[in-house]
Image: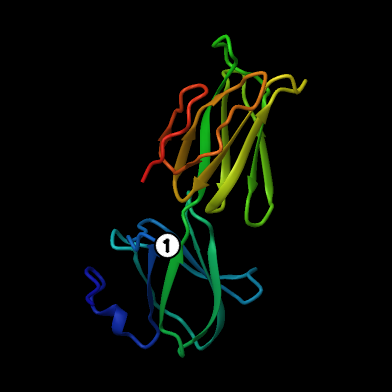
Amino acid sequence: MGWPGCGGQANRPDALTGSIVGKGSENPVAAATVHITAVDGNTTIAQTITDASGRFLIVGMRDGVYKAWASKDGYFEESRTFSFPEERRMEFTMQMLNEATGTVKLPDGAVGVDVVITFQNLTSGEVQTTRSLEDGSYRLRDLKPGDYRVRASTEKGDMEWARTVTISGGTTQLEVLLDDAIKSTEGVEHTGEVSPQHGADPPKLN
């Protein structure tokens, strides 16, 4: 594979090359930062940015053991330890950060302020919590892929809502309509634009 614009530097004996793709999609991750550090992670040896094809090139490497880090906003950071020149090429697969966002509304149509929204991972049991803002909006980041039980309730506990959702990548839009009882909303929703009608079974999105 050629490296446009590198002027043959990829073939130098002190060159480290690599690429980064998105987990699941295999699409190249452009503009990701690649750091090469000492094994303890405290001393930066080199740093570069991936091109539009998700590729990177670092020259001037010396023999030794290093740690490589790949990072980009919206993705989980990836790292690994490697030996140079035994490993001259590296490939990273980066998992996109998942988030859920939406608006909380009360039965009368007013926005729900300071409502507690809890996401519990049905596999690991891990619980992540956020609260709605003054405009009723909420956002919860860094959700791992998987099925979640989502609950929302007022501070007094007099109004609540629950649903099971699947988080699989990117942003899940999930609107919350509180009521005085948890409705029968046991269906599984997939990532995407989700705005179920009050009291209705949620649509299943492919």
Decide which of 43, 125 is in the foreground and name it: 125
Q: Quadrant of residue 184?
A: top right
> Vertically, is 82 above or below 45?
below
Q: Is residue 110 left or right of residue 95?
A: right
Crowdedness near tag 1: few (<14), some (14–19) or many (≥20) residues, C-alpha within 10 Å: some
Q: Position of residue 10 (x, y in %)?
A: 30, 79
Total numbered circles = 1
Q: Quadrant of residue 155?
A: top right
Kind of residue sitting beneath label 1: Lys
Q: Is residue 142 left or right of residue 21?
A: right
Q: Name, please, the residue furthest toward the right.
A: 156
Q: What residue did someone put label 1 on?
A: 23
- Looking at the image, which residue is at 33% across and 61% down? 28
Q: Position of residue 192 (x, y in %)?
A: 41, 39
- Looking at the image, which residue is at 57% across and 43% down? 141
Kindly state the secondary structure of the residue where label 1 is placed: loop
> Vertically, is 45 above or below 70?
below
- Looking at the image, which residue is at 67% across and 18% down? 180
User: If the image is split into quadrants, where does the N terminus sit?
Assistant: bottom left
Q: Is residue 1 left or right of residue 45?
A: left
Q: Position of residue 151 (x, y in %)?
A: 64, 34
Decide which of 89, 94 is in the foreground and name it: 94
Q: Is residue 125 left or right of residue 92?
A: right
Q: Name, please, the residue furthest toward the front.
A: 184
Q: Position of residue 63 (x, y in %)?
A: 51, 88
